[in-house]
Image (cartoon, rainbow, N blue to C red):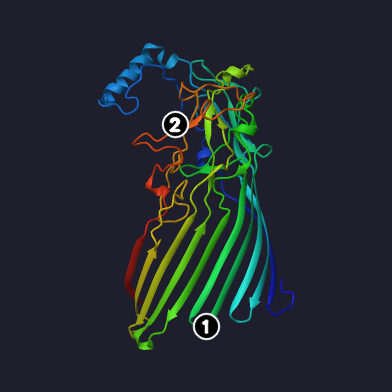
Amino acid sequence: FDPKGNGEWTVNGSYAHYVAAIANSVGDAGSAGGQPATIDFDYLGPSVNVGNPANPVSSAVALQTLFDWFNANGGTNRPTRGAPSIPGLNTHIGDTLKSPHSQEVTLGLSRRIGARGALRVDGIYRKFRDFYATFLNTTTGKVQDQFGKSFDLGIVQNENDLLDRSYRGLNFQATYRPVRRLGLGGNYTLGELKGNIEGENGGSGPTTSGIRFYPEYFNVSWNAPDGDLNANVRHKVRAWMTYDVPVPSPAGSLNMSVLQYYNSGTPYGAVGTVDTRPFVANPGYVTPPASVNYYFTARDAFHMDSLWRTDLALNYEHKLGLKQARLFFRGIMVNAFNRHGLTNFWGGVNSDLDLGCGTTGCINTTVLTNRNNNSIAPFNPFTTTPVEGVNWRKATAVAPAPGFGQATSRYAYQTPRTVSFSIGLRF
């Protein structure tokens, strides 16, 4: 909308509904074909190669020790460690399952500054709905395999009541050309991605929530607390300058530019697993969960380093006088000051030069509890507030393994100084 009809002021608004097809990993969850089953058992036998022994046994000997104990103590007839996952048997797809979606509303105002520049501000609100979740409770029933063994039945459906994810932001943009050869511009985004479900990870994309999975065995307040989500970048700045270097016309054209990046650090929390079975009267499940997630800190208690990066570019072009043929050269220097910030939780977020680090991320977020270290005191999560150092602790660095919050991959760090160039002909 142009209130004056001359383009000086412009008001804009929009509504959008974003949706895609159901993710293959979710849509195929009830199919036995091509889907791995998972049946876990606890190993309670002799320790092998614990820590960093001076003379570790070979992998073959270690595996033989593990399986000798396992086979001598019931083998596959042992109680399972939590609920097995057998696609096509104990996981079904709900009849009404649909793809998650988001609804977006934007409202903006722009102002033209003569013929040299422009200003613009936009407000954005985005709400996410219809999350994937596995429902497994006392009403979903049980199934049996061909050997008569019973399993609890989980049904993949959509969930909106207990899960929340929303984004709100303000985006400011400015461009200005003080002289013909010099261009300045930038944008700043103040945003917040908040809720209690990430909804995806770096390795597998869309994920299925367990917020309705054996609900008697956890409280939402400590299993899926609200907070800033891992993809939240509160402050994002991009500022640039371009300059057309004056050179004689027969020599061609030369352009130089600089681009400054800033992203505030993304958040993460200390989350570990606890066994709540001793504190819950089993209402009739075949295999109650052996562990559930527990947030020992706020979801956004820790932050990655902020990203500071300066990129430089040089572009040269020369007409060859043969129709449209042109000789060109392009040189780029990424991260000119060679900063080494620990900026990437998943990898590949701040630069397309980086790769992802898989489902566990690029840093160590291991939290030790009585579930994985019997020297740590157990606690009742329904009645007790755990104490760090007593009921839980962050993983410490033991060479070569990193400690909590330290890098597990080179992709945890921002892209180092990188120089690239290209030269060729355009016709």
The quarter of the image holding the N terminus is bottom right
The image position of residue 308, as x and y in percent, is 47, 58
Q: Mark 1 belongs to which amino acid?
A: Val
Residue 171: tell me if it is visible: yes
Q: Is residue 203 left or right of residue 105?
A: left
Name the spot of residue 408 as percent of width and height, x first: 40, 41
Residue 281 vertical position relative to residue 355 in the rendered view, above or below: above
Determine which of the numbered discs, if any, sits on residue 36 in the image: 2
| Mark in front: 2 vs 1 | 1
* Identity, as a three-letter code, of the amino acid under mark 2: Pro
**Cα gap from disc 2 to disc 1, whole angstroms:** 63 Å
Left or right relative to 60: residue 16: right
Left or right for 1, reference 98: right
Q: Please indicate, yes or no, whether residue 96 appears anywhere in the rendered image.
A: no
> Residue 114: percent from the left, percent from the top?
63, 81
Residue sitting at 56 percent across and 44 percent down?
22
SS for callout 2 = loop
Q: Residues within 10 Å of mark 2 (few under 14, many from 20)?
A: few
Residue located at (66% from left, 24% from top): 139
Q: Which mark is residue 179?
A: 1
Which residue occupies the extreme right position in the image? 3
The answer to which of marks 2 and 1 sits earlier in the sequence is 2
